[in-house]
Amino acid sequence: MTLKSIVKILLMLTCVGIGHVGWSQSNVLHIEPTLSFNSVTMDDMKVILSATQDEIPIELQTIDNFPTYWGFGIEVVGNEEDRFSFGGILHYNSSGARISSADYSGSINYDILVNRVVLGPTFRFMEPIGDRYAMGVSGSILGSFSNLNFQYRLSILGQNESSLNRFSSFSGQIRLNWVNRYQVTPGFYFIGQLGYEFDAISTKLKFKTDRNAWLLKPGGGNARLDWSGVRLQLGIGITFDLEPSE
């Protein structure tokens, strides 16, 4: 199966998920803006950062090494019998690493910056507990359109030098969450999700200026962005009553 086929299937499933409320017996639509906190694995990028640190003939300090970082997004889901939901996800998150050194004569910074747009269908099962509280589980099949930037900046005695190399790739993930929801009013609620995201597939990190060239790890082998990690999402939900389909 080609990358184009995978992307087409993913887009189709997402559209079907969002459009599900239009033709199902459900007459409720939930829109959920969320703020997320995301850990990432990025083993290949950490190896590249360490190799770069060893190659530069001055001592460089590690300032950041792909820490947990925030992101944001939106989920749109419809309810059927107030328990099972099927919808779509659109999220954005990023992370990065930096090694650096500075003294009276100048400074050097080397950054690895990663970001992605995440798109995919989501499935959710919620069990009401009392009048206001509900808990359940969710699962999502995701596609990530990722960007990678290598930035190098050198400043010595007023002389500046910099370089930027940009790459992009596509990857697929599976995300499983524990979900908690607190209903404030019939049309408004708070929602929290805690889970883990597993990397499933990934493509080569290709140069944006030359799609026939791609990034290799030190020692050989294709480098990849591994977005696996813990996901914590906090958000609000707004509920809209829709006319039932005939």
Image (tube, rainbow, N blue to C red):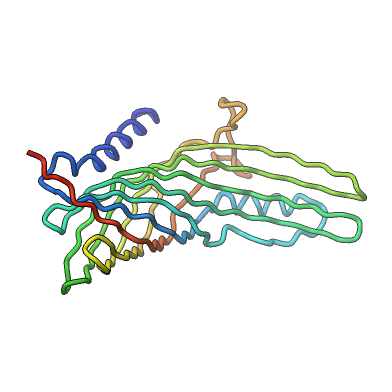
| Above or below, comparing residue 79 to residue 232 in the picture | above
Closer to the camera in the image, 12 or 243: 243
Instruction: Give the mark count.
Output: 0
Quadrant into which the C terminus falls = top left
- Residue 67, by quadrant, is bottom right
- Most distant residue in the bottom direction: 130
Image location (x, y in percent) of residue 54: 73, 54
Give the residue displayed 57% in from the left and 57% down from the top. 66
Closer to the camera in the image, 18 or 114: 18
Q: Position of residue 79 (x, y in %)?
A: 18, 53
Answer with left or right where residue 4 lies relative to residue 212. left
The x and y percentages for residue 158 are 91, 48
Seen at 24% across and 66% down, the residue is 185
**Left or right: where does residue 143 sit relative to residue 77?**
right
**Percent of width and height locating residue 240:** 23, 52
Q: Nearer the viewer, residue 237 or 52?
A: 237
Q: Residue sitting at 47 percent across and 59 percent down? A: 38
Write down the quadrant of residue 214 in the picture: top right
